[in-house]
Amino acid sequence: MKTPYYIAGAYVEITSVCNLKCIHCYNDSGKEKNEISVESFQNILAAHDNKEFSLTISGGEPLLHPKFWELIMLAKEKGVSDILIITNGTQITEEIAKKFVEYDISVQVSLNGISEDIHDQICGEGAFKKTIKGIEHLINAGHKNIVIRSMIAQCNKSQLLEFIDVMSKKKVSTISFGTISVQGRSINNKNALCMSTEENEKILEMLKGHKITKEAEKKGIKIDLPGASYNSGCPILHPSEEKVPITPRIDSKGNVYLCQNFGGEEYSFGNIYNDKLTDIMDSPAFNSFIKFCQMSLCYMHDCASCVWQNVCGRGCIAEAANRGSLQFTDGHCEYRKKEYANKLINEQT
Amino acid sequence: MREKLIKNISLKFPHQVHEDNLIILGRDGELSVLNNTSKFLYENCDNESIHSLTRCLIDACIEKEDLDEKMVEMDIVKAITEFEKRGFIAFQNK
Ligand SMILES: C[S@@+](CC[C@H](N)C(=O)[O-])C[C@H]1O[C@@H](n2cnc3c(N)ncnc32)[C@H](O)[C@@H]1O
Ligand code: SF4
Ligand code: SF4
């Protein structure tokens, strides 16, 4: 890339097909039937010309792609060593678990509650038992890089510590938490799912300092908590001296987006059915999109009357887009303003 | 007379109340933090003189007896001068 960026990897949703219908799914997976073809997948792999290239394969449910293993083998042949599969775990059989071990592929299994009722409330009846079985198959196969990932939601927030406690007794390497982004099906399920930025922050603080978390870490398990559930500015839109890594999102129709947080085809700036990923990231369309985003940051309505307008990076522009318009911010301003104020007052006293 | 009336032109500037403080983005792009007392003066100075503002502040204090009016007035002059320098207020020219 001739721009101040480089491609550090790709987040590819190889299919939109899914056997579950989770109420938080940002992709509304299972509704349509789109699949990344083998040819277009090669257009993504063309970007692998450096050592730092991590390929994340997601979906829908990636294991339901009829050519899943063909895609994996292509990536392996191309020399991609850092491959992560994001799966709901329900399709992981004993054989598949062994294959993941054989090909040294990291697996992240989504488990959204430590009890059957909570997980199934989010992911549908019967999902919990199947996902747990998939995790057991991975453990029994001796998989060394199992990531268990849970969303932090209104309906599971009271059992997050129990989640860490129970999962840390299993042979998993990472327990990871994420916050909900209001997209797709989560829009209509806000009550069961969403929390204020403030509540999210409190939960993260509590998890960080708790002895159950520390005990799990002592056992060598990585507890991966999201940074702040808001940010002050997008690192891509405020480039530094050094080249900025980009891991574009590629949806199951082949549309390319700036990052995983961007949804909505109007924000896509290329398609891997038409072009190689490297060409897309070097294209005038990409540059125009970056300029469009940077311009949008200057015209967010609320910022004109905000005291922090000269110091604030305007938060996450993808989240702003997901809320409906780039004329408004990402929805974390009240929290961000408090943080800025506390920092300024602390500096002055 | 310049000293007589103070015109509060606060609303021109982006500002944020944070706990007991008022944070203002001034015309030069500088951020100012007004603490509890400064915030009180700033919010109540509109159409007041230094003297009436001094009375107003003393009235609002719980331990009025311990206050020396002259000292309070001097502090207010200092604060008001600073506000004026930063463009947060202006004296009415009449
Ligand atoms: C869309 S799923 C696709 C892969 C696979 N089917 C799974 O469930 O892991 C990828 C990850 O995104 C998470 N996810 C889905 N909707 C989300 C949302 N609205 N906000 C944040 N994460 C979400 C899922 O929990 C899962 O961990
Ligand atoms: S979160 Fe994953 S498992 Fe759930 S519906 Fe979406 S794609 Fe399917
Ligand atoms: S309104 Fe929000 S995004 Fe805009 S400057 Fe203020 S805190 Fe930052």
Image (tube, rainbow, N blue to C red):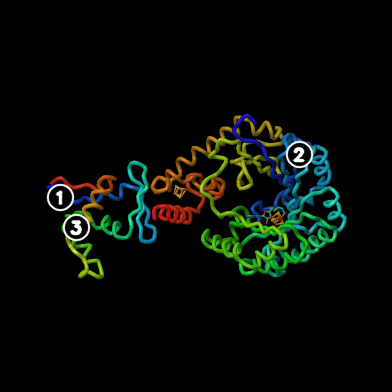
Can residue B86 be seen from the camera position used here? yes
Question: Which residue sits at x=62%, y=61%?
Answer: A152
The location of residue A12, given as percent across then percent down, is: 71, 44
Dot 1: element: loop
> Do callouts 1 and 2 point to residues on the same chain?
no
The Cα–Cα distance between marks 2 and 3, rounded to whole angstroms, is: 75 Å
The residue that label 3 is drawn on is: B73
Give, as a three-letter code, the residue at label 3: Glu
Q: What chain does mark 1 sit on?
A: B
The Cα–Cα distance between marks 1 and 3, rounded to whole angstroms, is: 13 Å
Question: Which residue sits at x=26%, y=70%?
Answer: B62
Give, as a three-letter code, the residue at label 2: Phe
Dot 3: element: helix
Give, as a three-letter code, the residue at label 1: Glu
Residue A304 image-quadrant placement:
top left
Badge 2: how crowded within 10 Å, few (<14), some, or many (20+)?
A: many
Q: What chain does mark 3 sit on?
A: B
Ligand 2 falls in quadrant:
bottom right
The location of residue A121, given as percent across then percent down, is: 67, 66
The residue that label 2 is drawn on is: A41
> Do callouts 2 and 3 point to residues on the same chain?
no
The location of residue A182, given as percent across then percent down, is: 58, 54
**Upstream in sequence: badge 1 or badge 3:** 1
In the image, is residue A137 above or below residue B83? Answer: below
* Quadrant showing the C terminus of chain A: bottom left
Q: Which mark is residue A50?
A: none
The foreground one among A194 and B89 is: B89
> Do callouts 1 and 3 point to residues on the same chain?
yes
